[in-house]
Amino acid sequence: MSAGVRGWARDLWLGVRLSVTGGPSAWIRTSLTTVGIALGVTTLLLAASVPQVVKGGAEREDARSIFGNSVEERGDDTLLARGEGTEYHGVRISGMELQPDAGERTTAEPPPGLSAFPGPGEMVVSPALDRLLDSPEGELLAERMDMRRVGVIGDEGLVGSQELYFYAGVDDMPEQGALRIDGFGQSSDDGELHPALLLLILVIAVVLLMPVPILITTAARFGGERRDRRLAALRLVGADSGMTRRIAAGESLVGALLGVVAGGLLFLAVRPPLARISVDETSTFVEDIIPSPTLALIVLLAVPLLAVGTTLFAMRSIVVEPLGVVRQSRERPRRLLWRLVPGLLGAGLLALMLGGDFSGSGIAIVQAATGVMLLLVALTALLPWLVERVTGRLRGGPASWQLATRRLQLSSGPAVRAVSGIMVAVAGATALYMLFDGVRAENSVQTHADLERAQGDAHAGTTDRESIDRAVGEIEEIPDVETVLHYVESFGTLWRKGTEGPSQETANIVVADCSTLVELAHMESCAEGEVYFAPQDGDVTASVPEPGDVVAVGASAEEMADARGLWTVPEMREVEPRDSPNGLPVRGLLMTPEALDGLWPAEGSVAILMRADFDDRDTLELVRNAMADLPEGDASTLVSERISSQLVTIQTWMVIGASGVLALIGCSMLITTLEQLRERKRLLAALVAVGARRTTLGCSVLWQTAVPVVLGIALASAVGLLLGAMLMSLVRISPDGWLAFLPMAGAGAGVIALVTLGSFPLLWRLMRPDGLRTE
């Protein structure tokens, strides 16, 4: 080994020894660095686990799929299957009904997670659904799902640990609407995402991960002032400037390596609790929370290098001399030009893409991600310059204000580093919310529901009058339901007047009482036994009936030749059509039951409209229970728009990630603030000793945080709006939502306020007289 390499190794080893054996001060600095880096490493390992989480869930969902296994001929190894489900307190409960063609003699393999098929009237449920059905909260659901539970689905049959899923056995499943299969499992192809959705996912990933390296670099600089004073002492015994840098790198390396180890252990510790959490019906298993080996290796190597690099970069602006550290003299003004370079490059990369379509190709993804990252990096570069320029012009004010501004004028770096993570989050989230609102408008459908006329609706695939009347009666007895309207809708085959047989035409038939008909059409009056006609509009399949035509009302499609089911169209009055309160168009023949002369539609569906107060979640569940015995019976509250399922999934992961990042940044800021207070222990105690009031010092600490926060949020909001407008233009969405910065700006300010309040107990303790003690 050459002398140069041995010298480097000796210097690094001395730095390691100083961090471990340097007394309480070194231990505290190493501990704070370890904690900060551990939080960052844990976050990065969790992010590296996302591909496996998605892959594992998709593989298990594919394994239980019934699509791609359909057969026409029944046999001992075939079965009928169809999807079933319900909703309870806003959570979707999915499942499947199964009916082996050979009954108990079946040789078909049961779905993953089951050892045998459930018999008729039996069901096998997921562990989470089993717990819900046994809990007081699931009492109404247990009334609806009253089949006998005979087992629990194994993990291999579930997408996530908290998934609400079931398999039910039946013996009367109609083949219409069911699928005959000879096995389970398929290779799914979810298809390509819409470019706008792909860009949204890309921005989410960049925005959520950008604060993590900022946290790591901030943690690597904890205790910098005390470390530099120790290095000055080493200069007295002959160390040169190169040696001091290598010793400092050795000190940082210890905290970084300990942080990597602690982060790995923390990652292992948080996996089980995370697997027990369900956010918007999304959960996973512990076995899936495994980082990609390649990504994990990158994290383990990059974090120590980043920490050491940050330390060496920070020392470029100081001179460690034998008699002290040249840091506290006035620094030269920060230069603006180079700080604009990342932002200009990022904006340029995005601007080059504005002329064409964002295709989602590999090059486009890299270019867009790089542009977003550079703009966010520019924010962290511009903030120190902005704080220096503004605080340098502040004069006068109360004592607490002067103490704060003078401290910022002397050294604003620590205060800026403490809030830089929040600033990146605010800027990124502002752009994200602008893009999300634009994509949401492009991927949502207006239901046209009139929420003034009705607040809920129910439906079922039956026309059985007795069952419908029973369900309507039960709904009317629910306390929070004010009014219940219902109508039966059916199609009838037409016999044109003067022809001998049925035509290929159909007529739409709507049967309801007058109180309901006036909600379905604009009519001056309504009388029992009357028939009305609401003209069809647009591209429809039903035909316009005329008086004297015959309609097969009381007969099914197979029995329509039975003369007992035929109804002759009488004279009718044309009315102006009106959409149902649930937003669905109702057209064709509108009539009261008396007009059918004792007949009743044999096939069709029923729709039930409700004026009700659904603030109590159980109200809707009681309605669903009333509809549970009807075929395909279900109920829901009316909404003005419906969002695509892909966008809902993206929103779910955005909420999960944003919550985690805010918590991470909050912890990082608290550690940073406590470290800064510890550095100023003697100064604070000295100020109290000479008569400064504690409240004055407390307010000064608050001002020191507030000034960079206000400037940072203003800058972050401007950058976020610019980035959001460019991203929206990238996918040809008109820029809008210019107030999107308000929610995240408020959340960022709230986190900072909580962190500042959390630091007050330590601040009060540090201002005691024993803070003047020194060695």
Image (cartoon, helix red, strand yellow):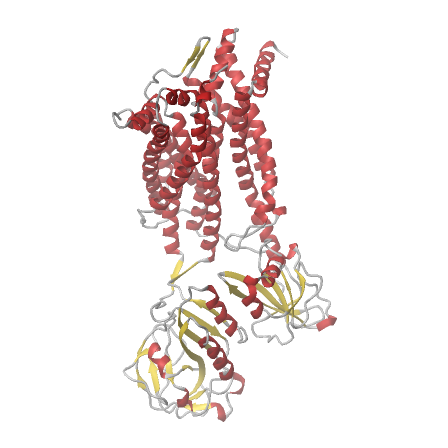
The percent coordinates of residue 418 (x first, y second) are 42, 31
Total marks shown come to: 0
Q: Pick the residue in front: 357 or 255.
A: 255
Q: Is residue 204 above or below residue 223?
A: below
The percent coordinates of residue 450 (x first, y second) are 34, 68
Q: Is residue 647 above or below residue 215?
A: below
Residue at (31, 37) in percent of width and height: 714
Q: Is residue 34 above or below residue 748?
A: above
Can residue 752 be seen here? The reply is yes
Q: Pick the residue in front: 27 or 506.
A: 27
The percent coordinates of residue 304 (x first, y second) are 55, 27
The percent coordinates of residue 451 (x first, y second) are 35, 67
Image quarter where the N terminus lies is top right
Can residue 67 be seen here? The reply is no
636 relative position to 628: left or right: left
Q: Pick the residue in front: 582 or 413.
A: 413
Q: Pick the residue in front: 599 or 258.
A: 258
